[in-house]
């Protein structure tokens, strides 16, 4: 076990709490910077996709994991980011301006959608966002002049001035850079008042209010920020897939994003990264699985979503804190060996939670 | 885009739309009833309700079209099968989740929905099937107002089922026990209500209602693994009606069913598909507790 | 000098009068206790003062300002902090973060500064932390600083909740049954801490409490309620001997 002597309150505020953390995150950073030297284009592409998922995941995690508001419609913000960016690029806007506008628009729409959410909790909100996502999907299919309708629209190649960002190495660095920036912003948010206000709302609205936290404002803000991150991911995703069609942003994608934050581990940014790795690499895993399964099983049409569902169910029942929670348990097992007790990580359950009159 | 409003309202046409709206609305209402029942008793939200309906329809199809059972035998057989599946689902998947946050349960049932769709796809394949019923194809002609037997059966069947449920909750011990368990899990347990068994029963009943919905709707729409997606509209219906209210579920279903039909004819394409969700969002803005309110804020 | 004055407050829930025509005023620097049998409307009164409920009639003035229409979240800014009967802490957070949330009203930075963690934000965080540590020292919570609330025993949680309320630096502190669920030893400590808060910080305290021992040790004045109505206000001794109060507790 590591014991740290603390001599200044600054130490509890730092992003890296001690030298060890700094070393390991530094090592990870160097490895990511050097990986284009060893990895093939295909794997760089896959990693870029993981980064994009992670950016979207940060958005959803801030909303669901930290503010406790569930969104079943985050694919809509992904779509808004992607389509706005593609449309503005097609109008000849420069790449950085376009991506910024896409992020802001997505954020604005998120804040507006957050407004009906202010009076609702839990399930109502989840369904409202679901309804919103379905409406967005329909708008994408029918607003032909902007979105190309069912035919979809091609996305122009990314470039800043005459410098092309299109080849896989540059795009990889672009995604890595933006992800690092997003992580930095999110971490800062979480260690200051606004982030604390969000977690306060998650744990108890009534006492958050008594602490002077404006529920409506903070929830709208959380929605806006969350949608912004997801929209930003959407505009990067537009380049990754190259051609936008309404069926790239279905309910399944929304669920996949939720799966990512749940499997990764709710309430931690580490969880986002684990979740993104999981979601990003799952299709490869499934492809391998398909090869080994008997053809009769492997040919089931809905196999992939089915396995998604199965993993979701198993994680929720056996490890509700996700991959990150499991990792923490394994780590403390070794740190405290042989004193580790299972009960250390026992969760509190609540049996009295009625919100109803009859 | 051309607005069809110019065509004007013809009385008969309106009536015709109303009838098909009501029949579609009954189906939404029945699925919504399943949602509400489970929510009332266990405070869990079952997002896989539509998929239970899909499963029910497939079982009915197997019994009637494959095993060639007569309809009057296949009907109870389907309900029994679904009741068992419902109870098993509760026992194996939901019971470990008692006391966990609502969100986890919601996610779990979403996952369950994906699994059920994959399983159905694996067993029955993805091509749409049609269910043969003794009442297929017939119509009643009321002075030009044409009502198919299938729609007739949907409406009457829903009415009968509602009456049955009303009597059940009002007068039977089990019904009362369910109401008690829905108020307060711990208190119900202390006064000797076997809360866990009650939960299994609730799931069984809810799955059976979905099975009835599946059998009723199968002759009108075809059976395929994705038919459970109407569950989302039913969910909207449950909220419009006031989540937690049984009559609200049916009323909400009818509203959405009827509006959809009219939107389909009088508004540009695409509006019919989203009308349910637009109603939902509007409702959440204007009166978030729904038509029959039953929510209350937490006491401190 | 009255800090808080309630005039003819009433609130009814579907025909039941939870609070009926209650008027009282609390002086600056007082420890004012509210007693009464279960269902007397004590907690409802708290919920009215902290604006969780809207009064049906009547008004509340705090510091010469009418607060009957002030939105709930503004109450904390005005300087009223409260605890809850069954504790309402942020369960998944550490004690430290709970107390930092208590500092929310003192926030002077905006969202953009926080996103970038500018030096002004760092200064503010350090200031918050110092103030939090003062409260931790006052209430002896040093050992629990980095523990998650969900893992703490009930007695500690109650103290954390008081600490969180103090982080607002309130002028008026509302304590809803601070001793319920505490053992005699912890209750003993509590009475000293209430005195400390009152005397060292100069905070006015209104307390709903059942433990008459604690009430008589700490309170300046006591108000007795029964069935939503005010029965008597007076010194702890006066109240304990008041015939109407005895009747409310013991029956005829």
Image (cartoon, coloured by chain):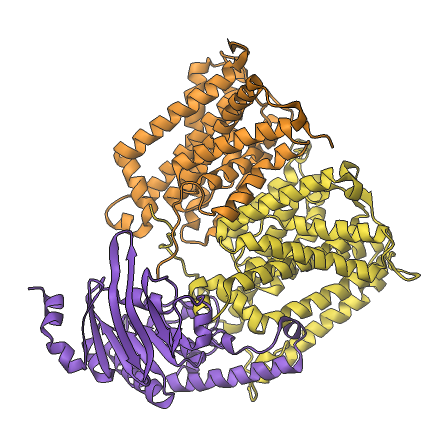
Chain colours: A yellow, B orange, C purple
Residue C156 appears in the picture as rendered: no
Give residue B196's position: percent from left, percent from top: 34, 44
Question: Observer-nearest residue: B205 or A84?
Answer: A84
Residue A141 appears in the picture as rendered: yes
Q: Is residue A167 above or below residue B83?
A: below
Give residue B122's position: percent from left, percent from top: 61, 31
Please name the residue shown 52% across and 66% down the image. Answer: A199
Give residue B126's position: percent from left, percent from top: 64, 28
Question: Observer-nearest residue: B274 or C124?
Answer: B274
Question: Observer-nearest residue: A202 or C2?
Answer: C2
The quarter in which the C terminus of chain B is drawn is bottom left
Q: Is residue A111 above or below residue B276?
A: below
Occupied quadrant, residue A244? top right
Please name the residue shown 37% across and 49% down the image. Answer: A356
Could you tell whether B266 is left or right of B112 in the image?
right
Occupied quadrant, residue A12? bottom right
Please name the residue shown 63% across and 23% down the image. Answer: B8
């Amino acid at each position: 076990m590591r014991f740290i002597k603390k001599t200044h309150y600054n130490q509890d505020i730092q992003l890296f709490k001690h030298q060890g953390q700094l070393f390991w995150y530094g090592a990870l950073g160097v490895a990511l910077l050097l990986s284009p030297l060893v990895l093939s284009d295909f794997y760089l592409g896959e990693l870029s996709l993981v980064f994009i998922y992670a950016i979207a995941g940060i958005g959803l995690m801030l909303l669901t994991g930290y503010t406790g508001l569930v969104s079943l419609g985050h694919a809509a913000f992904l779509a808004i980011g992607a389509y706005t960016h593609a449309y503005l690029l097609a109008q000849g806007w420069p790449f950085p301006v376009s991506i910024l506008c896409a992020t802001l628009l997505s954020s604005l729409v998120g804040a507006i959608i957050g407004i009906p959410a202010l009076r609702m909790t839990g399930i109502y909100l989840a369904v409202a966002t679901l309804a919103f996502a379905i409406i967005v999907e329909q708008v994408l299919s029918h607003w032909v002049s902007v979105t190309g309708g069912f035919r979809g629209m091609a996305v122009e190649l990314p470039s800043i001035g005459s410098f092309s960002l299109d080849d896989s190495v540059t795009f990889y660095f672009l995604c890595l850079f933006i992800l690092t920036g997003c992580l930095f912003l999110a971490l800062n948010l979480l260690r200051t008042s606004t982030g604390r206000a969000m977690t306060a709302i998650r744990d108890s609205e009534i006492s958050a209010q008594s602490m002077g936290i404006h529920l409506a404002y903070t929830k709208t803000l959380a929605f806006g920020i969350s949608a912004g991150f997801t929209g930003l991911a959407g505009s990067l995703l537009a380049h990754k897939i190259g051609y936008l069609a309404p069926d790239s942003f279905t309910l399944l994608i929304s669920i996949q994003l939720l799966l990512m934050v749940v499997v990764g581990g709710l309430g931690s940014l580490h969880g986002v990264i684990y979740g993104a790795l999981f979601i990003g690499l799952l299709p490869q895993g499934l492809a391998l699985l398909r090869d080994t399964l008997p053809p009769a099983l492997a040919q089931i049409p809905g196999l992939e979503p089915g396995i998604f569902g199965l993993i979701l169910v198993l994680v929720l029942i056996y490890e509700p804190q996700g991959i990150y929670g499991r990792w923490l348990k394994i780590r403390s097992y070794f740190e405290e060996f042989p004193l580790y007790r299972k009960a250390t990580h026992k969760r509190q359950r609540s049996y009295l939670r009625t919100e109803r009159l009859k | 885009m051309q607005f069809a409003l110019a065509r004007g309202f013809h009385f008969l046409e309106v009536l015709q739309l109303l009838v098909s709206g009501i029949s579609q609305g009954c189906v939404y209402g029945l699925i919504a009833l399943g949602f509400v029942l489970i929510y009332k008793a266990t405070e869990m939200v079952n997002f896989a309700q539509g998929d239970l309906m899909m499963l029910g329809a497939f079982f009915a199809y197997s019994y009637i079209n494959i095993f060639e059972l007569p309809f009057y035998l296949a009907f109870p057989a389907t309900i029994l099968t679904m009741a068992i599946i419902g109870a098993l689902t509760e026992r194996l998947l939901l019971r470990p989740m008692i006391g966990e946050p609502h969100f986890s349960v919601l996610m779990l049932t979403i996952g369950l929905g994906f699994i059920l769709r994959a399983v159905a796809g694996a067993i029955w394949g993805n091509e749409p099937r049609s269910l043969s019923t003794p009442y297929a194809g017939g119509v009643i002609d009321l002075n030009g107002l044409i009502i198919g037997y299938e729609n007739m059966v949907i409406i009457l069947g829903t009415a009968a089922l509602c009456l049955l449920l009303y009597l059940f909750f009002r007068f039977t011990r089990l019904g009362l026990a369910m109401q008690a368990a829905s108020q307060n899990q711990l208190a119900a347990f202390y006064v000797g209500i076997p809360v866990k068994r009650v939960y299994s029963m609730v799931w069984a009943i809810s799955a059976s209602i979905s099975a009835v919905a599946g059998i009723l709707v199968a002759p009108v729409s075809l059976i395929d693994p994705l038919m459970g997606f109407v569950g989302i509209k039913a969910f909207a219906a449950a909220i419009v009606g006031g989540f937690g209210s049984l009559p609200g579920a049916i009323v909400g279903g009818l509203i959405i069913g009827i509006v959809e039909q009219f939107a389909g004819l009088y508004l540009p394409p695409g509006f019919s598909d989203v009308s349910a969700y637009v109603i939902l969002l509007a409702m959440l803005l204007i009166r978030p507790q729904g038509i029959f309110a039953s929510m209350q804020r937490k006491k401190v | 000098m009255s800090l808080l004055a309630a005039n003819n407050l009433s609130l009814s829930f579907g025909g039941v009068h939870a609070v009926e025509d209650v008027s009282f005023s609390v002086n600056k620097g007082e420890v004012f206790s509210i007693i009464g049998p279960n269902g007397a409307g004590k907690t409802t009164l708290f919920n009215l003062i902290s604006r969780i409920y809207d009064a049906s009639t009547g008004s509340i003035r705090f510091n010469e300002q009418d607060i009957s229409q002030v939105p709930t979240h503004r109450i904390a800014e005005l300087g009223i902090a409260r605890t809850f009967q069954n504790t309402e802490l942020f369960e998944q957070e550490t004690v430290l973060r709970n107390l930092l949330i208590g500092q929310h009203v003192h926030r002077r930075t905006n969202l953009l500064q926080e996103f970038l963690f500018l030096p002004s934000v760092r200064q503010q965080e350090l200031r918050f932390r110092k103030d939090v540590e003062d409260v931790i020292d006052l209430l002896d919570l040093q050992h629990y600083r980095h523990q998650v609330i969900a893992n703490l025993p009930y007695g500690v949680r109650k103290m954390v909740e008081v600490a969180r309320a103090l982080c607002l630096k309130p002028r008026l502190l509302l304590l809803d049954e601070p001793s319920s669920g505490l053992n005699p030893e912890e209750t003993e400590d509590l009475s000293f801490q209430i005195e400390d808060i009152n005397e060292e910080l100069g905070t006015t305290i209104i307390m709903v409490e059942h433990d008459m021992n604690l009430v008589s040790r700490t309170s300046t004045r006591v108000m007795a309620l029964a069935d939503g109505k005010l029965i008597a206000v007076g010194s702890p001794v006066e109240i304990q001997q008041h015939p109407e109060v005895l009747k409310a507790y013991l029956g005829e």
